[in-house]
Amino acid sequence: MAWASFFVLLAASVSARVTTRSADECGNPPHLENGSPTAQFLSSTSFPVGTTVLYHCHPGYVLQQGSSDSVSCAEGLTWTPLDATCERVDCGNPDEIENGAFVAPSTTFGSVAVYQCNEGYKMSDGGVRICGSSGWTGQAPTCTVSTAAEILNEMITFGHELINKEESVIKSYYHLLERERELLRSKEKLLHEAEKYVNENIL
């Protein structure tokens, strides 16, 4: 019975030390939606009067303009009001390009913008940008018109491909004609042998 009473008193003492804070300290700092106290304060359990806690927003969010990023433990052992709002990063519309356009279903954090050039133009740089914490990644591509030489080269390449296909067809047809000629020669030879046999043995 004495041991049971000892353990009850010990548990009560430990609980009191865990839940009771110093008389001149504030409790845990206020909660910030989509944000939290900076790393140096996350593990803190003691907040004496005069302590200032700094906040930051989670990745993909940014502190709204005009917001305050800190609170302080005041004399009345209460935190000053948390006047902060973490709003989702919005990169706005990506840069427009000449002779082309972009497709971007959304402009918030993580969104993707895909650029395309108009017909007759080619893209000189990468055509994909992503909305990150600091705005759109990379640079907007440029669309340049294909030169006359490039167009001619494409036509010449196509011409060579067409000639090669026609040459292959002609070779196949010529091979077939050669086989037909050989067959005709064989028929002529058989007829000649038959005619010779008739003249020598029947007539």
Image (spheres, rainbow, N blue to C red):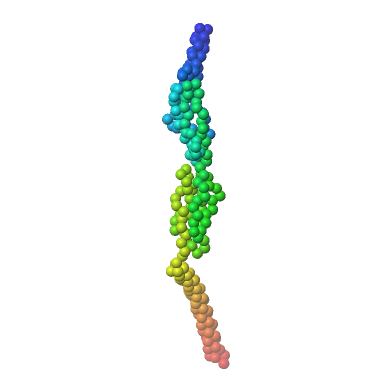
Give 153 or 104, whichever is nearer the viewer: 104
Identify the residue shown where x is 51% and y is 82%: 185
On the question of residue 49 being in view, the answer is yes
| Image location of residue 116, percent across then percent down | 51, 57
On the question of residue 46 being in view, the answer is no
Q: Residue furthest left?
A: 40
Q: Residue furthest bottom?
A: 203
What count of labels does the image hold?
Answer: 0
Identify the residue shown where x is 50% and y is 73%: 166
As drawn, 178 above or below 11: below
| Image location of residue 138, percent across then percent down | 44, 50
As drawn, 94 above or below 177: above
| Image location of residue 198, percent across then percent down | 56, 89
As drawn, 49 above or below 32: above
Identify the residue shown where x is 45% and y is 31%: 54
| Image location of residue 190, percent across then percent down | 53, 83
